[in-house]
């Protein structure tokens, strides 16, 4: 197993339950990404009651709250202790390659031979920044969610946040509250209210079965895997952090950053369409929830259906900002994350850096992957999504080992 995040540990527990001898190799500490790769104020956007792993769940005093990154690290570390997971920390995997009847795994603490390898090394190992960043004038400080910790790091003055998914809306809000003028560049996005009909919107995702949809029930899997994260934040007030909330607070909304030419940031003009599309998709999802509640006779237990104001289109939105004028002093690239497989010497990564796999069964016998977006279900990359995937993949792996013995 490569990686002692929640996914690798969930699979480790399933392997132990089947008495399959294994080791979990971790370059840092257990739950390393929550300790090293998150900004200071981050809280989960999934509510505490939803945090569950095989045979283990949140049992604290605040089931409707949202954990801080440090609390997630504790939650996962307790799980590792409970399972007695055979983790080797501070052991970086530097190469995985095929060897007779299995794999050769090179690490910073010696080499291993194994019959199978499970990649649980994470889907978000590095920020994904578009190549147009190269056109940013050198006077502007650039940050990614990996080096951003809090607004105090930013120079005074205007900030351009590129990307309006969960990370972008959360950082735009926090930086704006620090007193800096924020411009938010918005491309395709997923709008969601924090609560719907009196319940957390992620309760609806769970209860209605949407999050549980399997990959064979999803029409356009490639698209589903590329969907940006929803505009959600976990705060004690359970506040909605959509574009209406951000523009009402005073954040300037501009279109998708299309190019940077001669120091000019050029934004596309399709905001009205982007907003209409996101509003429409949200409405459809809310319709799905309403249908489920009606058919399942759950209407009495929740508030009546709600509909939300369409996203307001700004009266004036610049199509161009001169990045040399001093108006913008820093840029935060909230443009997503990507996995890193530069240590994987097996030809299973395509030209776009995606692993070739079907439901986590990688295109190389004996190689498996966990924790990637919509791996086997919509919920696959979330904490509560690991259990079902881990169990099924470990079943597959056990079958593979049994077959290989014959
Ligand atoms: C900003 C952000 C917010 C999120 N919020 C939520 C949320 O609210 N709720 C939710 O359910 N999910 C959330 N997620 C998604 C998901 O839960 C996390 O990405 C989670 O960290 C993924 O767990 P994992 O075990 O798959 O990967 P990781 O936690 O990334 O674990 C992978 C481990 O592999 C190790 N590793 C990587 N490469 C090597 C190597 N070569 N050798 C040895 N070890 C290696 C890493 O150090 C790491 O510890 C969020 C993700 C991000 C990025």
Image (cartoon, rainbow, N blue to C red):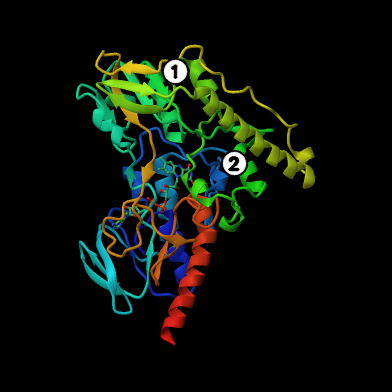
Q: How many marks?
A: 2
Label 2 CA crowd tier, 10 Å (few <14, some 14–19, many 20+):
many
| Quadrant position of residue 307 | top right
Question: Which residue is disc 2 drawn over?
Answer: 202
Q: Looking at the image, is mark 2 or mark 1 earlier in the sequence?
A: 2
Q: Is residue 133 left or right of residue 66?
A: left
**Residue 151 in picture, x, y percent from top left:** 33, 25
Of residues 212 and 46, which is closer to you in this image?
212
Choose mark 2 or mark 1, whichever is in front.
Answer: 1
**Residue 45 in picture, x, y percent from top left:** 50, 38
Of residues 267 and 124, which is closer to you in this image?
267
- Can I make out residue 241 in this image? no
Q: Give the residue drawn at x 52%, y 28%.
A: 274
| Quadrant position of residue 113 | bottom left
Query: Which part of the image, by quadrant, shows the N terminus?
Result: bottom left
Mark 2 element type: helix
- Can I make out residue 260 in this image? yes
Q: Is residue 378 above or below residue 89?
A: above
Q: Is residue 390 left or right of residue 293?
A: left
**Residue 352 in picture, x, y percent from top left:** 35, 50
Mark 1 element type: loop
Q: Give the residue drawn at x 53%, y 35%.
A: 190
Q: Is residue 239 above or below residue 126?
A: above
Quick check: is the Cβ at mark 2 less than 8 Å away from ligand 1? no
Residue extending furthest toward the bottom: 406
**Residue 379 in picture, x, y percent from top left:** 54, 50
In the picture, the disc for residue 211 is: none
Q: CA distance from mark 2 to mark 1?
A: 26 Å
Question: Which residue is disc 1 drawn over?
Answer: 251
Query: Which part of the image, by quadrant, shows the C terminus?
Result: bottom left
């Amino acid at each position: 197993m490569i990686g002692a995040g929640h996914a690798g540990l969930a699979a480790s527990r399933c392997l132990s339950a089947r008495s399959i001898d294994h080791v979990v190799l971790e370059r840092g500490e257990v739950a390393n990404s929550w300790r090293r790769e998150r900004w200071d104020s981050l809280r989960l956007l999934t509510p505490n009651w939803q945090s569950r792993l095989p045979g283990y769940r949140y049992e604290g005093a605040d089931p409707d709250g949202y954990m801080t990154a440090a609390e997630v690290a504790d939650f996962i570390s307790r799980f590792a202790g409970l399972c007695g997971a055979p983790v080797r920390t501070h052991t970086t995997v530097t190469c995985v390659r095929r060897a007779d009847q299995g794999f050769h795994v090179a690490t910073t603490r010696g080499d291993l031979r194994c019959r199978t390898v499970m990649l649980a090394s994470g889907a978000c190992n590095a920020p994904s920044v578009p190549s147009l960043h190269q056109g940013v004038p050198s006077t502007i400080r650039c940050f990614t969610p990996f080096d951003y910790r809090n607004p105090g790091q930013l120079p005074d003055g205007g900030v351009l946040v590129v990307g309006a998914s969960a990370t972008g809306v959360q950082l735009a809000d926090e930086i704006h509250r620090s007193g800096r003028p924020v411009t938010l560049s918005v491309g395709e996005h997923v709008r969601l209210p924090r609560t719907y009909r009196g319940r957390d919107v992620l309760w609806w995702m769970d209860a209605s079965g949407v999050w549980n949809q399997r990959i064979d029930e999803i029409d356009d899997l490639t698209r589903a895997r590329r969907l940006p994260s929803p505009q959600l934040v976990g705060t004690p007030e359970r506040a909605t952090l959509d574009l209406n909330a951000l523009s009402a607070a005073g954040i300037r909304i501009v279109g998708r950053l299309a190019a940077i030419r001669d120091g000019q940031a050029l934004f596309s003009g399709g905001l009205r369409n982007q907003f209409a599309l996101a509003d429409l998709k949200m409405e459809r999802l809310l319709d799905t929830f309403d249908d489920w509640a009606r058919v399942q006779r759950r209407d009495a237990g929740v508030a009546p259906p709600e509909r939300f104001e369409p996203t307001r289109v700004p009266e004036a939105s610049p199509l161009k900002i001169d990045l040399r004028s001093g108006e913008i002093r820093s840029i935060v690239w909230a443009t997503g994350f990507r996995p890193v497989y530069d240590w994987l010497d097996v030809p299973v990564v395509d030209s776009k850096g995606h692993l070739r796999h079907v439901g986590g069964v990688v295109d190389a016998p004996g190689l498996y992957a966990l924790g990637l977006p919509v791996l086997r279900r919509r919920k696959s990359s979330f904490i509560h999504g690991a259990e079902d995937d881990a169990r099924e993949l470990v079943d597959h792996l056990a079958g593979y080992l049994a077959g290989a013995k014959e």
